[in-house]
Image: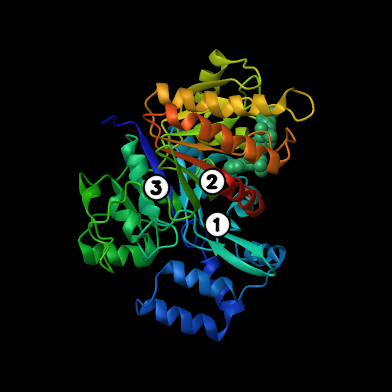
Amino acid sequence: MNASKVAYVLDFDGTITERDITREMARHYGGKHYDECSAAYGRGEFGMKGWLARMSAHLPSDTAELLAFAGIRAGLRPGLKEFFISARAKGRPLYIASDGFGLYIEPILERHGCREYVSGIFCNETIAAGGRLETLTPHAHRSCPVCGNCKAALVIALREKGFRVLYVGDGFNDRFAAAYADGIYARDRLAEICTAAGLPFKRWDHFHDLLGDDQFAGEHGNHRFCDPQGMDGVDLRSDNSGGIQMKKIVSGVTIECVRGDIVAQPDLEAIVNAANAQLRSGGGVAGAIHRAAGPRLEEECRLLAPIKPGEAVISGGYNLPNRHVIHCLGPVYGRDRPEAALLANCYRNALRLAEENELESVGFPAISTGIFGYPVEEAAAVACRAIAETAPALEHVKTVRFVLFSESDLAVHRKALEKLE
Ligand code: AR6
């Protein structure tokens, strides 16, 4: 294994921030429900997924209020930014994995000028739906009832990409991911658990403690102690599908819809970029993918550009957890004609490239429906039809996933998928 390929996975609440904002939020708004719910969680009556579902029902539906609540409590642990800068200087990607309410992570990182150092944020999504809050768990394990966000799946996906993973955490629900990592930095409850389980770890207090030598622990990444409720033996490899909202099998290809972030799909071999003609970084999907993949993606893309509407090219995934990125240029609605044929070509060409590269799974964002202005209902119908028409010719590609950013785009794609003959 290439010793220089190292990635960090960090918990957020109590690790990056000094306080556990999710717990404080739940306690503040939940009152006695918080005590009852947390006691039941402590007795093992349900896992974090259940805790989040119960507690988010007591939060106010005004997300601006919640962000203000979080902002006041968002003190970062000392040395965080220096640590982020040093990780970047060493070429080590950084991921955040959080099993809290999730909604405040990105704003807090932005506010402290730290977002740009983070390759991917794997968290739950707390959204206002029908006048109340709901927490979605797009990274839950398919069959495990314990965690909302299966942090272990991210660690495993990075290890499968050849990274040695250093896990940094503080809490009880970091134990599974830490056990799969190649090195553990632990404090507080996580340190107690590692001690009790005999897992080697380095104690840390603030981020300056992580700037020195790395603490790898040989092969302890093979420990499995995801077993509080009979989880042992669960195959965590294809772990990112707990949040799948709809599936349909067409000519042997599973087409599925999930609400989430295209750069947070560690179980897919390729993700698709809604690119610009020059294949540069940009807004929306292109910005997120280039930020997460790192500057080497843009270097490779320079050799592949320019592309025309409907065309697709394939590159490496670099710091993304995916092996490849397939870049498609969608049509600008009202300018590049005929729009529907050009959009369908994006999906067909992307799938052809996946097939030629013998890839098993591909994730698509809703190409052209952002800055390029394609109405989402029309685009979803075109996309579903193009995938269904291509499916009979696919031998390697077994899973095609739509990764939709918003609840309403998810609903539209579900409907389009349902309508497929
Ligand atoms: N994950 C999943 N979906 C996303 C994400 C994400 N991280 N970010 C945005 N979306 P867009 P386009 C959704 O504008 O219309 C770029 O700047 C978004 O809500 O990224 O094909 C390029 O440089 C929307 O529904 O792609 C091009 O110049 C959909 O993804 C241009 O924009 C596509 O939004 C391409 O425009």
| Disc assigned to residue 154 | 3
Residue 100: give x, y in percent of width and height: 50, 63
Query: In which quadrant is the N terminus drawn?
Result: top left
Given contact means CB atoms under 8 Å apart, are the residues at marks 2 and 1 in contact? yes
Given contact means CB atoms under 8 Å apart, are the residues at marks 2 and 3 in contact? no
Q: Is residue 54 above or below residue 195?
A: below
Residue at disc 3, secondary structure: helix
Q: Looking at numbered disc 1 in the image, what kind of residue is underneath it?
A: Leu
- Quick one: 59 or 13, which is closer to the camera? 59
Distance, label 2 to label 3, CA atoms, is 23 Å
Label 3 neighbourhood size at 10 Å, few (<14), some (14-19), many (20+)?
many
Residue 143: give x, y in percent of width and height: 35, 60
**Of marks 2 and 3, the one in the foreground:** 3
Residue 61: give x, y in percent of width and height: 68, 69
- Quick one: 157 or 116, which is closer to the camera? 157
Distance, label 1 to label 3, CA atoms, is 23 Å
Please report the residue visible at 40 percent of the width from the left and 50 percent of the height from the top.
Answer: 209
Quadrant field for ligand 1: top right
Query: In which quadrant is the C terminus drawn?
Result: top right
Residue 51: give x, y in percent of width and height: 47, 72
**Of marks 1 and 3, the one in the foreground:** 3
Please report the residue visible at 64 percent of the width from the left and 28 percent of the height from the top.
Answer: 343
Q: Answer with the quarter of the image where residue 198 lies.
A: bottom left
Q: Looking at numbered disc 3 in the image, what kind of residue is underneath it?
A: Leu
Q: Which residue is mark 1?
A: 76
Q: Earlier in the sequence, mark 2 or mark 1?
A: 1
Q: Looking at numbered disc 2 in the image, what kind of residue is underneath it?
A: Lys
Q: Is mark 2 within 8 Å of ligand 1?
A: no
Q: Which residue is mark 2?
A: 81
